[in-house]
Amino acid sequence: MKSAQSNKTIVAPTSWDDIPCGAYYRQALEQDLKAWWPKLFGFHLLKVGALSADLDTDDCAISHQVNVGLEGEGLHVIADPYQLPFANKSVDACLLAHTLSYTVDPHRLLREVDRVLIDDGWLVISTFNPVSMLGLGKICPILFRRQPYRSRMYTQMRLLDLLEVVNFEVLHRAHLQMLPWRRRQVGRPLSTHFLAMGCLSLIVARKRTFPLRLTPLKNKASTRGLRWPVNAIAHSCR
C-alpha cells in the first residue's frame, strides 16, 4: 500500500468558521451522527483536533468528554495528537473530525489512537471527499492555497485501507453534503441520488483484537507425516 505520509506543511483551522461553508459541514456531520451517539457506551470520549472539539456531541452516552489538540478554543488538554498523554487502552471512543485531513502522517495518528482505545472501542472519522464538487477545487491553481482545498482529501476506499492496517471494523460509512454552499436538506433529489459525490466522508468503526481476515495455517509436520506411509507402500509394492 502506498505511504500516506506527506512532506508538505499543512495548517489546520481552529474552528469550522475558518472554512468556507464550514457551518454547513458541521451541521451535516452533527445531523448524521445523532443516530450513533446513543450507541456509544463507556467512560471517556476523546475528541482529537480543534474541529472535533467544535462538534456538538451532547447526545453521546459517554458523559466525560476530553478535547485535545495543539491549538483552538475549547481544548481541555494541549498536546500533540501524535503523542497523546493517555495510558494504553484508557479511552472508550475517539472522534477524528477532519483530523486526518490536516495531518502529514495519518498512519502514525491512527496507531496512536489505536494505542489509547480499549478493545472494541469506537472510532468516528470524517474527511473531505475528493470525488465531489469540493474536490474539483483541488485542480484549480487559484483555490489551491485556500481552505479547505489545502487540506488532504481521501476517498472512502483509501480510508478503508488505512483502517484495515490497524484492524478496525467499519460499521457505517456515508457521504454527506452534496452542495457545499447549501444547508443540508433530507429528501432533495441531489442528496438522495448522488450520495457518492458528497463533499464529506463519514466512517464509524470499532477496534478489533482478532484478525478481520483469518488465514489458515499449514501444518507442515502433519503433511510430512502423511507422505511417509505413501512412500513406504509404494516401495513395498516394487
Image (spheres, helix red, strand yellow):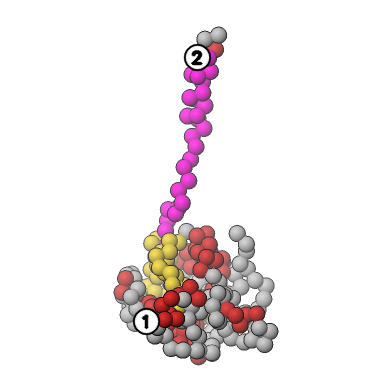
The residue positioned 50% from the left and 72% from the top of the image is 84
Can residue 111 be seen here? The reply is no
| Residue named by callout 2 | 233
User: On the rendered structure, is 124 left or right of 105?
Assistant: left
Q: Residues within 10 Å of mark 1 (few under 14, many from 20)?
A: few
The residue positioned 47% from the left and 29% from the top of the image is 222
Bounds of the magenta segment: 207-234
Q: Residues within 10 Å of mark 2 (few under 14, many from 20)?
A: few
The residue positioned 62% from the left and 62% from the top of the image is 2
Q: Nearer the viewer, residue 8 or 161?
A: 161
- Residue 108: x and y in percent read 56, 66
- Residue 37: x and y in percent read 34, 75
Judged from the image, the secondary structure of the residue bearing numbered disc 1 is loop
Q: Nearer the viewer, residue 108 or 192?
A: 192
Amino acid under disc 2: Ile
**Which is more foreground, mark 1 or mark 2?**
1
User: On the rendered structure, is 98 left or right of 11?
Assistant: left
* Above or below: residue 196 compared with residue 20: above
Amino acid under disc 1: Gly
Residue 187 disc label? 1
- Residue 156: x and y in percent read 51, 68
